[in-house]
Image (spheres, rainbow, N blue to C red):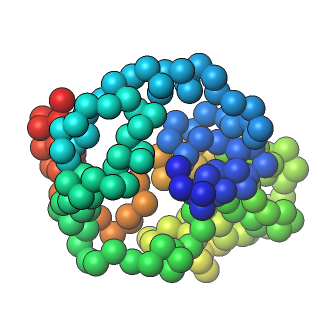
Amino acid sequence: FCTPCLQECLKPKKPVCGVCRSTLTPGSRALDLEKQIETTETTCNGCNKKMYLSKMRSHAASCSKYQNYIMEGVKAVTKEPLHNTRSFPNRFTFPCPYCSEKNFDQEGLVEHCKALHSMDAKQVVCPICASMPWGDPNYRSANFMEHLQRRHRFSYDTFVVGDYDADEDDMMAQVLMRSLRDK
């Protein structure tokens, strides 16, 4: 992870891994994972050089063939030029629409609202939906609790990797093509 992405993962009250969504415990090391990274061998998709996973990050940063490989994939699935990530709304943490408490991930917001606001009938805007490109920041849900239960049982960013402007069909075709090519 880069530092800004890791910081976003650690913001919610219940920090989660940005890849697998398992709970993170700040300050504790995953020694079994470190050992696996130190002993698992892989091949660079750019230059085909073999190395341990623990060396891959520094190699990828300096391998121009790997950089080209990544950019080919990005260009293949992006409709428009890449946007500055600062222009995207925060899709990692959300405020409670009832009490304005901040920094809930989707699961945390659902738990918080079930525990403290289950009987509140006030119509509110869903902060999760409002952060999405298709979301209407002015739409007030008639039954927010039911909406949360039905629409937010999973995290959108588990299924959409960063670029909401990418064409889904093109993305799927690119993934299938790369999975056949990569070993």
Going by the image, does 103 lie left or right of 152? Answer: right
Where is residue 178 shown, x and y percent of the image? Answer: 17, 43
Is 51 located above or below residue 60 in the figure?
above
The number of numbered badges drawn on the structure is: 0
Q: Is residue 27 left or right of residue 64?
A: right
- Residue 133 in the image: x percent, y percent? 45, 72
Residue displayed at 27% across by 53% down: 63
Viewer-side residue, 56 vs 165: 56
Left or right side of 114 for 149: left
Residue pictured at 18% horizontal, 29% vertical: 183
Q: Residue at x 87, y 50 (%)?
A: 116
Which residue appears at 55% of the width and 25% of the height? Answer: 33
Residue 58 coordinates in the image, percent (x, y): 42, 47
Q: Position of residue 107 (x, y in %)?
A: 67, 45
Q: Which of these two is toward me, 75 or 106?
A: 75
Visible residue check, residue 77: no
Could one spot residue 55 in this view of the protein? yes
Where 103 sits versus 16, above or below? below
Above-or-below relation of 132 to 67:
below
Quadrant hosting residue 70? bottom left
